Image (cartoon, rainbow, N blue to C red):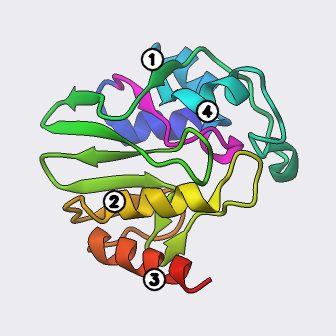
Amino acid sequence: MIEGIWNALDGLRLSCVLLTHCHADHSGGLSSIVREFGCPAYMGTLDLGPYSSNDRDVLFSRQLGVEVDPVGCKALSEGEVFDIGDHRLRAISTPGHTAGGLCFYDEVTHSLFSGDTVFARGYGRTDLPGGSTSKLAESLSKLRNVNIGMMYPGHGPASPDGNESVREAVKMMEGW
């Protein structure tokens, strides 16, 4: 895995890792990355506890068959900004899929890294420990007020119109 990351970086320096949530399919390799690259990692405040204590139910690691080796992460809250090269990433608190879910909005390119909050055609599960349908509905409503161009979800294809993906997710959720 690390070799693939090195190749993808192609001489660039990894300055930090921003996690959208604590589930093992997103955080499982974090300790290897942090050790190899020596960079800090950040995660939503409410996801830090389950991650740090390796709560296999909340991390969904038992079900996924993925082992998590927790490494020190820094707490990240709504509105915190990372200036990375030509990009300015702002953390948006989007609980629902997990209690401490985050999206990262690039204020320069209007791109959204949505994790498992919203996908090109749908939204993340809320039936896992720490999930909440009502909180996810609030998070999707919040994202309706963001000018999103490209959207990069945690699973599935990117969406060239993130606002449309959010609108569709809201419609799907309201239809339940």
Percent across and percent down for residue 110 are 18, 55
Residue for badge 4: 47
User: Quick one: 96 or 86, which is closer to the camera?
Assistant: 96
Q: CA distance from mark 3 to mark 4?
A: 27 Å
Mark 3 in CB contact with mark 2 (< 8 angstroms) = no
Neighbours of disc 4 within 10 Å: few (<14), some (14-19), many (20+):
many
Neighbours of disc 2 within 10 Å: few (<14), some (14-19), many (20+):
many
Please, what secondary structure does the residue beneath circle 4 have?
helix
Above or below residue 19? Residue 51 is above
Q: Earlier in the sequence, mark 1 or mark 2?
A: 1
Above or below residue 117? Residue 13 is above
Residue at 34% from the left image edge and 72% from the top image edge: 159
Mark 2 in CB contact with mark 4 (< 8 angstroms) = no
Residue for badge 2: 143
Q: Earlier in the sequence, mark 4 or mark 1?
A: 1
Q: Is residue 114 left or right of residue 45?
A: left
Percent across and percent down for residue 150 are 26, 64
Q: Magenta residues: mostly which secondary structure? A: loop
Residue for badge 3: 171
Please, what secondary structure does the residue beneath circle 3 have?
helix
Q: Is residue 116 visible?
A: no
Amino acid tagged 2: Leu
Amino acid tagged 4: Asp
Residue at 47% from the left image edge and 37% from the top image edge: 5
**Residue span colored magenta:** 14-26
Amino acid tagged 3: Lys
